[in-house]
Amino acid sequence: MAERIDGKKIAQEVVTIVKTKTVELLAQKHVKPGLAVVLVGEDAASHTYVSSKARMAEECGFLSVRHKLPADTREEDLVSLIETLNADPAIHGILVQLPLPPHIDSGRIIQLVAPEKDVDGFGFVNVGKLRSGELGSAFLPCTPAGCMLLIERVRGRNLSGLNALVVGRSNIVGKPTANLLLAANCTVTIAHSHTGDLAGFVRNADIVVAATGRPELIKGAWIKPGATVIDVGINRIPAPERGEGKTRLVGDVEYDAAEKIAGAITPVPGGVGPMTIAMLMANTVVSACRAAGLEEPVL
Ligand code: NAD
């Protein structure tokens, strides 16, 4: 039976490191990490995400600033806000919650965030650094960075020569995760919706990262014995066995079958999910350390 990778526990360990560094920053440099979260519109899921990020920032001892703007906010007003936050020395991380309303050019807004405050790691400077292997000065996108930490907790820091398969090629998860695995000297394959014989690629992989948003796409029987399986997918499916109209969350991997074969596997929920917010906190404290000239925490 596979080891069940406890994302909640590992995320909590990251948060503890962040809190310790925050205390150190305040004591030694009189600096409090500042995270600004910007939300435009009324999307219910976005409101929930933003609230939990802001709450976690407060729990970490950060200055936590929320900017909630109406759905009809003009793009130029959002631009002004980002420019103000870029120039504010009390703010070390700026997060613009996506999606933005359709009348706003999301690409333009994302690229406006100063690279040294881009704690989501979506701006071209940080994407380019990751792509070039300049990880030391980059901000790594939170979900991929969280996946890597989970993999390292199971496999150790030396992943050299392992076959890694990333299923999904989004800019947010798939591509940056593949770049991180490549930087860790894995032999990396990226599969996507046009890939034939997905099963064949999965069978050959020592590490599988699934990020497709397709419920239980990856069958347990495909998994290589002993493989490390990281399931990023979050899919809500009908669960009539729980009562009429009920639903449940599943990942992109057929968990029950996969855990009989894999060496280690993340559950959904409770695997990758909790890591994303923890890594956002880590990026923010790293940003504050860089600004203040204090050594960065080691995760
Ligand atoms: P996306 O829709 O942007 O990308 C999905 C990718 O999957 C695409 O590259 C597509 O080519 C690939 N794909 C689709 N069908 C496929 C198939 N049949 N075979 C192989 N590849 C296929 O999604 P995303 O933003 O990368 O998110 C992926 C999943 O991860 C979603 O379920 C999302 O909710 C979840 N997610 C979770 C977290 C977290 O914190 N846990 C963060 C981000 C995304």
Image: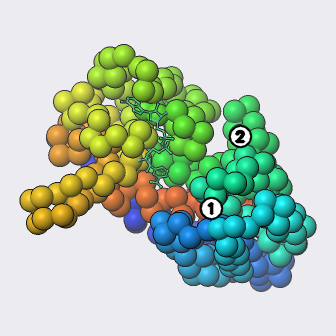
> Regarding mark 1 in the picture, which secondary structure is present there?
loop
Around disc 2, counting alpha carbons within 10 Å, would you say few (fewer than 14), some (14 to 19), or many (20 or more)? many
Instruction: Residue at 76%, 53% (x, y): give it.
Output: 109
Q: Is residue 96 rendered to the left or right of residue 207? A: right
Q: Is residue 203 above or below residue 151?
A: above
> CB of residue at label 1: within 8 Å of ligand 1?
no
> Regarding mark 2 in the picture, which secondary structure is present there?
helix
- Amino acid type shown at disc 1: Gln
Q: State the residue position of label 1.
A: 97
Q: Which mark is residue 127?
A: 2
Question: Which image quarter holds the N terminus?
Answer: top left
Pinpoint residue 254: horizontal percent, then vertical percent.
Answer: 23, 41
Marks 2 and 1, Cα distance to the nearest angstrom? 18 Å
Instruction: Residue at 65%, 48% (x, y): give it.
Output: 140
Instruction: Residue at 43%, 21% (x, y): give it.
Output: 194
Q: Which of these two is toward me, 4 or 118?
A: 118
Q: Is residue 132 rendered to the left or right of residue 161? A: right
Place residue 208 in its image quadrant. top left
> Quadrant location of ligand 1?
top left
Pinpoint residue 20: horizontal percent, then vertical percent.
Answer: 63, 75
